[in-house]
Amino acid sequence: MPEPTSFHMSPEELRRNGYAVVDWIADYYKRIESYPVLSRAEPGQIRASLPEHPPSKGEPFTEILSDIEKLIIPGITHWQSPNFFAFFPCNASGPAILGDLLSSGLGIQGMLWATSPACTELETHVLDWLVEMLALPQKFLSKNSGGGVIQDTASSASLCALLAARERATGFASNWRGCDGKLVAYTSTQAHSSIEKDVQIAGIGRDNLRLIEVDQEFAMRHDALAAQIDKDRTAGLTPCFVSATVGTTSSNAIDPVPEIGRICRANNLWLHVDAAMSGTAALCPEFRYIHDGLEFADSYCFNPHKWMFTNFDCDCFWVADRAALIKTLSIQPEYLKNKATESGAVFDYRDWQIPLGRRFRSLKLWLVIRHYGIEGLQHHIRQHIQLAQEFARWVEADSRFELAAPAPLNLVCFRHKAGDAANQALMDRLNRSGDLYLTHTKLGDRLTLRFCVGQTNTEARHVQRAWQRIQEEADALTASKTA
Ligand SMILES: Cc1ncc(COP(=O)(O)O)c(C=O)c1O
């Protein structure tokens, strides 16, 4: 046999194997409810099932695909199960999966407008569409002073915002000389941990991040923010950045953005608004109140990869003044120079993010918006919120349980009244059963269960069944105590 001259997958093989993969994915969604939602793998179990050494000769695709079921599925926690109520959702959908596939098929790298004009222009266009869809302030539109860009995550979006805030506060000098240890950033005790990581990376330092106390509903106390800013100024420090949250991770609290915004305006601080999951609710006019005060924001982000049916990763990030962001992140090496950039007529999105390279992520978002239409998206978001609200009413009506925080949208924080150990046991039993997956937080120092309705395919029957399982396990807990 002559040696093969190529080991690549031919277009015909790609077609055949591609059909098999799409079939596998479609079948996976059909049988997804038969798997335990939370993976039961023990540490090291998946690696132990893999060959110790890589293959020296290529293997048939059918064999590789069959190993997905055999070797990989046991180590999968099924985020796409309609019985997934943990953390925040990270939902997928048919159009987003296919959009990602198209993006992989094209295999472009969109660091510059010139390296694929469609990658940049579709992204700008879809982010302008979203300004309209969410009724965001007009300043975020690309035709005005701002513009939107897709980041991998909300963590990266807030880091970019913080870097631009740092530069604005120092006349763009810290890019050259580093931080002077005087810059101060602010967020609430309930903000996502990514803000703490961002201040470390940006050189502001953890000591210079003020975690502002929250009120009874776990929202930032704006009076405490104002007092802390005054105190820092008096101490000769330079307040530069506030991150407010619309829908905190623990309890979905909504910070008072209008009041925070006025404080930022008065003190010339950059206001970033992080609406990672909850921003999606603003697709529906009746929930747009969550964005009150956004007219004061210098930047804003939300994650379609959480609740807007768009596969990870996809965070949409807008700035009111794109010049500040670009000036902060732009570097012009000789090998990237080109006529389009020099003309000033195009966006080069490498100047709007930390890495140089970037995928064609707007394709999946474009497919999602075109497939569902605004009305389709609104339908499913309303349904999730309505199901969560119904769940909250069941909790309130059961004397063994109590709500632990207001439930404005699709997250219900609740607890069994028997205390932390009982709640831990209840959660462990439910998660071990494989029937559903929910996670916890601490609110007011008490263990609290979180039930988040947002998975793409969650319907009323899944929420009803989850509540039934919670009640059954609560009964079993009471029985084991009295036995
Ligand atoms: C409010 C909030 N901000 C930021 C994040 C971080 O998200 P990402 O994984 O996109 O960085 C989360 C994650 O759940 C979040 O809830």
Image (cartoon, rainbow, N blue to C red):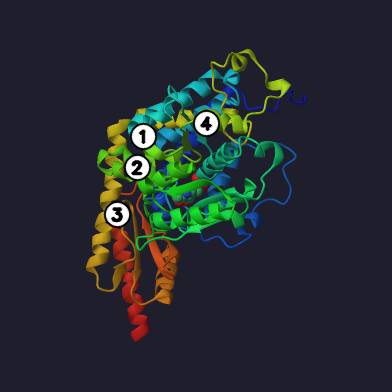
Q: Secondary structure at mark 3?
A: helix
Residue highlighted by disc 3: 388
Asked if marks 1 and 2 touch (Cβ < 8 Å), the reply is yes
| 284 sits to left or right of 320 | left
Residue highlighted by disc 4: 18
Q: Nearer the viewer, residue 183 or 17?
A: 183
In space, the residues marked 4 and 3 are separated at their CA atoms by 38 Å
Residue at position x 58%, y 34% in the image: 353
Asked if marks 4 and 2 touch (Cβ < 8 Å), the reply is no
Q: Position of residue 222 (x, y in %)?
A: 40, 54
Residue highlighted by disc 1: 136
Q: Nearer the viewer, residue 203 or 78?
A: 203
Sequence order check, earlier mark of 4 and 2: 4
- Give the foreground label among 1 and 4: 1
Residue at position x 60%, y 33% in the image: 328
Quadrant that contains the C terminus: bottom left
Circle 3: residue type? Ala
- Give the foreground label among 4 and 3: 3
